[in-house]
Image (tube, helix red, strand yellow):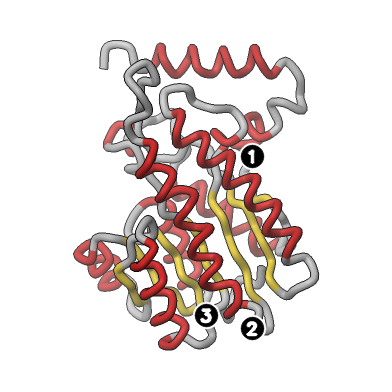
Amino acid sequence: METTGNTILVTGGGSGIGRALAEAFLGLGNQVIIAGRRESVLKQVVDANPGMAYAVLDTSDADDSKRVAERLIVDYPKLNVVIHSAGIMRGESLQSGATELEVTVATNLVGPIRLDGLLVPHFLKQPHAAVVTVSSGLAFVPLALTPSYCATKAAVHSYSQSLRYQLKDTAIKVHELVPPYVQTELMGDRQLNDPHAMPLRDFIEEVMNIFQNSPDAEEILVERVKPLRFAEANGGYAEFVRHFNDQMVAARVGE
């Protein structure tokens, strides 16, 4: 994608990776609109970033998505990029039932697909446009403690490939951003302060370098996520998955 001269909608833009990406793209001279469910949080981000705008949006709600998308197209006729950063990740015990299944699927998978359906026809009218999906390294090596999250991110990867193929003869680029374990509040304060997680600033710096230096990259892969992304291709996948999950379980013993 072109990294300047865009009008960009960033879902989940009130915190974490979404906010950091929104601020980075704003700094490059783009018009940026952040979206999320908590207006108070969005206002704080916008107040800290003059020129940024916001829209209250629950991407898991079909009616809300339609209403907001239609309004944004009217208010921002040059809207040409969406970054799907809204997401939730919660632990689940499958022996007790996947209790977070519905909300996880609605937010992480159905929401982005629905929003693309509302925005892509408008994007096709623009000189250039982009859809940035956000999957995860856990799309390729699942963390068994968060099964629904990992399943949705694997589905986002698959969906991204289909969307890219269907739009291959258009001016819309489809990029899949694949984060590793990053210091955000996705799973609360523990993750935010975990020294084993990649610092958010380092992650965003590497991501923006890829966007700027490899504008045609289909997958945005920082070095830290590559062991997960290519685990199956590198061989010994079953053992890799087992060892990875054993480490994660051991790290949480006593919490």
Is there a contact, CB below 8 Å, between mark 3 and mark 2?
A: yes
Is 204 drawn above or below residue 236 in the view shown?
Answer: below
Is residue 184 shown to the viewer in this render?
Answer: no
Q: Secondary structure at mark 1?
A: helix
How much space separates mark 3 and mark 2, taking CA atoms?
Answer: 8 Å
Which residue type does callout 3 highlight? Leu
Tell me if mark 2 has few (under 14), some (14-19) or many (20+) residues whose alpha carbon lies within 10 angstroms of its own: some
Q: Earlier in the sequence, mark 3 or mark 1?
A: 3
Tell me if mark 3 has few (under 14), some (14-19) or many (20+) residues whose alpha carbon lies within 10 angstroms of its own: many
Q: Quadrant of residue 145?
A: top left
Which residue type does callout 2 highlight? Gln
**Residue matched to label 1:** 223
Which residue type does callout 1 highlight? Glu
Residue 183 falls left or right of residue 140: left
Query: In this view of the protein, which residue sits in the foreground, 15 or 142?
Result: 142
What residue sits 50% from the left and 17% below the top?
Answer: 245
Residue 161 falls left or right of residue 4: right
**Residue matched to label 3:** 79
Q: Quadrant of residue 135?
A: top right
Q: Nearer the viewer, mark 2 or mark 1?
A: 2
**Residue matched to label 2:** 126
Residue 150, x across and y down, in percent: 50, 34
Residue 209, x across and y down, in percent: 62, 57
Q: Earlier in the sequence, mark 3 or mark 2?
A: 3
Is residue 158 shown to the viewer in this render?
Answer: yes
Is 255 drawn above or below residue 3 in the view shown?
Answer: above
How much space separates mark 2 and mark 1, taking CA atoms?
Answer: 33 Å
Quadrant for the C terminus, please: top left
Q: Secondary structure at mark 2?
A: loop
